[in-house]
Amino acid sequence: MLESLVGKAPAIRFASVALVDGRSFAHANGASHDADPQRSAALMSSLLGLVESFSREALGSKALYNSTATEQGSIVMVRVPTRTKMHTLCVCADASDNLAMTIRTALDTAAQLALLIDAKH
């Protein structure tokens, strides 16, 4: 599914799924990008864990996603809504895609991934 996503959306530099313990579960790089799946997974898991903790501390609320806007593009992370809540999706897009579209892509992809992951387990 991730390979299909990066293949049909040229703005996406990579899409990656990590387990909550920081291990890579699935990863696909775009044609002109070479993100390291394991390094990405470790960073994604740590950052989303911090964002979720801060969200609970600051607002007493569950984080829906995390977004980072940079000069080169956007990074969006979301918990994949599987039964176990053990997966995190990250979608990284270049500046040709706007942040709102990257968020929508990440949320929709996470929902589709949850169906696939839950069906296999």
Image (spheres, grey):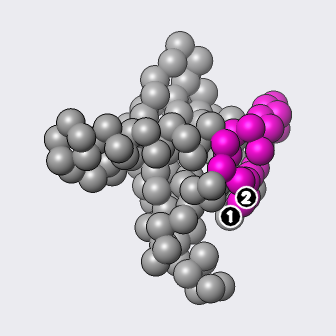
Amino acid at dot 2:
Ala
Residue 34, by quadrant, is top right
- Secondary structure under tag 2 reads strand
Disc 2 versus disc 1: nearer the observer: 2
Q: Where is residue 120 shown, x and y percent of the image? A: 65, 85
**In the depicted structure, whether residue 87 falls above or below residue 11:** below
Q: Residues within 10 Å of mark 2 (few under 14, many from 20)?
A: some
Q: Is residue 99 left or right of residue 70?
A: left
Q: Where is residue 104 shown, x and y percent of the image? A: 41, 49
Q: Which residues are magenta?
A: 22-42
- Is residue 103 visible to the viewer in this orientation of the structure? no
Q: Which mark is residue 26?
A: 2
Residue drawn at (67%, 42%) of the image: 42
Q: Which mark is residue 1?
A: 1
Residue drawn at (62%, 85%) of the image: 121
**In the depicted structure, whether residue 3 falls above or below residue 58:** below
Residue 41, by quadrant, is top right
Q: Where is residue 11 shown, x and y percent of the image? A: 62, 35
Counting residues from the N terminus, which is met first, the one under dot 2 or under dot 1?
A: 1
Between 32 and 18, the residue placed more toward the observer is 18
Residue drawn at (43%, 39%) of the image: 50
Q: Indicate whether residue 25 is drawn in magenta.
A: yes
Asked if the residue under mark 1 is in contact with the one under mark 2, i.e. CB atoms within 8 Å, the reply is yes
**In the depicted structure, whether residue 73 falls above or below residue 91:** above
Residue drawn at (51%, 37%) of the image: 47
Amino acid at dot 1:
Met
Say how many tags the image has. Answer: 2
